[in-house]
Amino acid sequence: MSPVSRKRKACQQWPSLENEQGLQQQINCEGWVESGSVSDDGEGSSAWVTWHSKIPNGLAQSWTLANVGSSLRKMRKVKRRRVSFSRMDGPDLGGSTTKKDRTGPFSILSIPPELLDQIVAELSVRDVVTLGLTCRYLHHFCSTDAVWKRISRRLAPRVGTEDAEEGFWKRAAVLNYTKGLFFQTFGGRRKTVSRTVAPHLSHGYRKFIPTKDNVFILDYSGTLFFLKNALVSSSLGQIQWKRACRYVVLCRNVKDFATDPRNDTIYRKYLYVLGTRDIPLLVTQDPSDVAHTCDCVEVYLQSSGQRVFKMTFHSSMRFKKIKLVGQETERSLLLLTDDGKIYSLTINETQLDQPRSYTVQLSTRKITKCLPHITVAEVHSNQSSALYITDSGAVYLEVHTAGVYRDLFGTLHAFDPFDQQIPLALALSSKVISCSLGYNHLGLVDEFGRIFMQGNNRYGQLGTGDKIDRGEPTLVPYLKRPLDIWCGLNDSLVLSQASDFSKEVHGCGCGAGGRLPGFPKGSAFFVKLYVQVPHCTKLLCSTRECLYMLSCYDISEVLVFRELPCTKGRTQGPDVELEGSRTCARYLSQLQSCSSLAEQMERLKEIISEMGLSSYQRDFLQEAISILQRSTGGQGP
């Protein structure tokens, strides 16, 4: 009898899977079975076996066999082969060594570099970063520019140059993988976070400005995108208004752009774009010379994207930032040069739509004239004030109206209505790295991650726990190391990172119109808002209609705060702590001597008023005790 006939006869004797009803346990064979070999679990009672055989004449390639007990014993002559997988070249997880295959155990390190490069190039950015944390070899392999170049080309095909510096491709891949613009509307029933359309040609997101009808986004390659709102048809056949559903490229070679600094988008009619343009070659110029470039400011209509005005500067003037301040009839453009100087010019927005040409005068700002030794690094502006941050972290503020000056400083002393550009230095001992300027209040973040608020506090927008105005920077002690801070008309927002690296948005101030989701009555403290924040969010912006969040992670701009050094008061800490511990022990003994819970609560309120706490901390603890009294059935105050 031939071997094929023996196998057919054996298969007819063995029961099939479909006819077996009394099977109590199923065990998947660990071994890999070749043609003419069987692998079982050694028990011999019941097992699942898949027989792979190369049989000619179109016979079946596999049989499923069950309960082969006695038949398997008759085939002990057949050679068994079991392959054991282990970690690298060491023993298995149980600690025992098994007989290895003559080809050796499988290891990912044995994959050829060409094949491994092809595999890694198909992974996402998150998976490549995770794979690089496994071992030194994969970390070195996942850090090469060749791998990140292929991933970056897949995410953004038109981004990058051939002579890019080291680390360019990894930064480009991370920028394009994490980019996104999200928004949450304040009105209506829907309170979820939505995402706008993502321009495929963009190289990350660096800055954005929402207007009345559209959204403008600037990427890291200097391209300004025009995201348009439109009326679209929903799945139910209804016509609905959709934000930023399509986009076009507005202009290229853009350095910065700005619009009306007021929070209400209805005032944002024009968009001012600071860019670089080529100067055409003159007839008398040598054609072999490279064409010169110059900086210019172009004004576009936000509704249609049409350019209505253009200002060109001399080729020797180089600017990097632009801000607006003032009313429409006397709009001042603040221009920051590369060497840290401030220039300004004044135009009338109401005449921009008239087809005529005129010359405007570019003059030096008062802060550059009075303090020529300082170098301005950042400029922030509002309708009636401007704030400058120097490279050393000093802050200077210029206020143009008496009302805002009173709100910010609490007095009109030193306010000169005839010279409104006088810079006023804010008293802050540490270096300021970021800030936000609202209508009549401001927020500062120093190098140690501390938040300082100043100005009007009528709605509790300073987050100090009360509604008392502050004429100088005041520390907010319970909120530290923010990623971004934003000050609006009468509310403030802070973007922070939790211990599990998730992002949170805290807000305080007026909650009218839903601008503080979850707190319609507002709050005098910074409270965690009911907002689902994307993981890589870095910028916040709030308007009357919705809250915008810009997501984009730049590996070259990681925000690192310094540790706060020990102060003089901390060096005298042991004596102060000893006296404080004795006082607290005396307070505890007084609480224990009380006969009832209500008496303990009243005594605790008196102790809180005696302790050296700030007003908002004292009010908070007393209110918390009152809540506990009411919840336990006691009488409140």
Image (tube, rainbow, N blue to C red):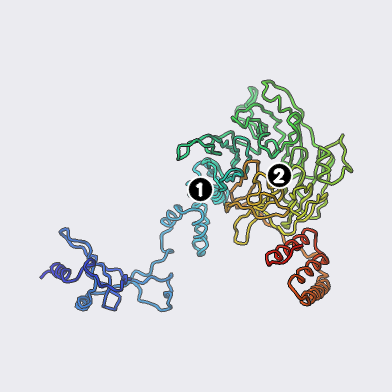
Q: Evaluate whether residue 164 shows in this view.
A: no
Q: How crowded is mark 2: few (under 14 residues within 10 Å), some or many (20 or more)?
A: many
Height in image: 585 above or below 123? Answer: below
Q: Dot 1 surroundings within 10 Å: few (below 14), some, or many (20 or more)?
A: many
From the viewer's side, name the closer residue of 97 and 550: 550
Name, please, the residue furthest toward the right.
Answer: 413
Residue 116: give x, y in percent of width and height: 43, 57
| Element at label 2 | loop
Q: Nearer the viewer, mark 2 or mark 1?
A: 2
> Label for residue 111?
none
Relative to 511, 608 lies left or right: right
Give me the residue at 41% from left, 79% from top. 96
Q: Which amino acid does label 2 sit on?
A: Gly
Residue 626 position, x and y percent, is 73, 63
Q: Which mark is residue 488?
A: 2
- Name the foreground residue: 621 vs 169: 621
Residue 152: assigned label: 1
Image-quadrant location for residue 7: bottom left
Q: Quadrant of the C terminus?
A: bottom right
Q: Distance between the residues labelled 2 and 1?
A: 37 Å
Residue 33 visible from this viewpoint: yes
Q: Please report contact status of discs 2 and 1: CB closer than 8 Å, yes or no.
A: no
| Mark 1, secondary structure of its residue | helix
Provide residue 114's location: percent of width, then percent of height.
Answer: 42, 55
- Vertical order, 16 against 227 (above or below): below
Which amino acid type is shown beneath numbered disc 1? Ser
Please give left or right for residue 232 compared with residue 574 in the image. left
